[in-house]
Amino acid sequence: MKGKQRKAGALLVVFVLCGILFTGCSRMGKEENNMSKDPKEQRAADGEVVRKRAEELEKQVVVTIGDFEMTMDKMMFFLYSVENDGTVKEYYYQAYYEMSFWDSPYDESGATMRDFYKDYVMNSAIQYGVLYQEAVKAGLELSEEEKAENAKFIDDFLDVASAELLERTGFTKEKLTETLEFMGLAEKYYDAMAESFEISEESVAAEIKKEDYKEYSTEYLYLSTSSYDSEYNLIERSEEEKAAYYELMQGYLEQLKQGKPMEEVAEQNTALTYTTKVFLADEETVDPSYRQAAAGLENGSYSEVVKTRYGYYIVRMIDNNCMDSYEAARKELLQAKEDEAFAKAFEELQLSYPQDINEEVWGPLVLGEIAVVPTE
């Protein structure tokens, strides 16, 4: 749960549901082939196959963490979740780069994304295994609300999962319930650890200064006075046309000052662009004329018509003390400090939990080919 792994249960849930929707077409062919069979008999037959698969996976110990044996039935949820995310990436890599995402290089050592994510899964499983055992020692339990959320996810998952998918993974309602409870308790212990870290707001404020994140939230109307030809050469309108456009913008400004919303004014002319812009006061990517016009505005007030080489703006200030970027930077730093504190604490904690990976089970596994149903 370090860094982006914190609340991994929630992230894995997203990967699972997105992956099922993405690969859902693989479900249809198989179900169509079974339409001649009695639906109740077919469901019973499918359920028995999945149950046997779950029992088979439960016997395969992947890694021992202290006194806890992480068996393949629980590990399968981690594998399937990550493979689903990779399945979406694989589709786009094949479509746009004509190469495999899984086999693309991760670093200069020759490791591939397949290698990286396999290590990621094992490291995640070990973290969860250690924290789960600590949670049990501490007497932590899931709340009724958390159990209900898990139950809803499982129902939603089983409602859209194909028979083939379930046969590969052994995902029964019972096994998924056990796995999500295991993950939930581990995350509860992580939260308890995080609360014990002494990370003061003052230390963050000393590093993230508000004045460095002065930000404007604005909205504007824009009328272009230029375009590009087929060879991307800039074509500017004549001075007479620009003058006429300027007069139009002056008229729109008067309507705005009389209280008409920008969105309504924009509806009067299809050439008008209406949108919002949030930017740092010294952001160089924003047109200097636009920045200068916004800088002197009070909240709710309008600029005069702003002339640029490419067109005319009318800027309205929504919030001249917007703190979105500051808050984002502050939260990012807080999370980084929390991750650092967790990494240090976990390094010491896991010394009490010797780890033994069963290479006979883990070694032959090829990520991307374990749990996901191949798409055609």
Image: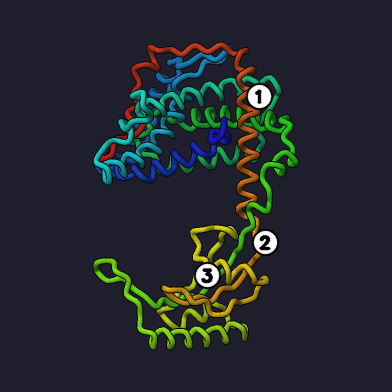
Give the secondary structure at mark 1. helix
Q: Is residue 210 left or right of residue 76?
A: right
Q: Quadrant of residue 343?
A: top right
Model colouring: rainbow
- Tell me the residue that label 3 is attached to: 289
Residue in the foreground of this view, choosing between 297 and 184: 297
- Tell me the residue that label 2 is attached to: 321
Amino acid bearing label 1 = Ala
In primary-sequence order, the first of circles 1 and 3 is 1
Q: Is residue 334 above or below residue 283?
A: above
- Tell me the residue that label 1 is attached to: 135
Query: Residue 154: where, in percent of width, then height?
Result: 50, 38
Can residue 154 be spotted in the picture? Answer: no
* Residues at discs 1 and 2 in contact (Cβ within 8 Å): no
Q: Residue at x 41, y 27 (%)?
A: 116
Nearest to viewer (mark 1 / mark 3)? 3
Q: Residues within 10 Å of mark 3 (few under 14, many from 20)?
A: few
Q: Is residue 278 left or right of residue 330?
A: left
Q: Residue at x 41, y 29 (%)?
A: 117
Nearest to viewer (mark 2 / mark 3)? 3
In primary-sequence order, the first of circles 1 and 2 is 1
Q: Residues within 10 Å of mark 2 (few under 14, many from 20)?
A: some
Amino acid bearing label 3 = Ser
Q: Is residue 106 above or below residue 351?
A: below
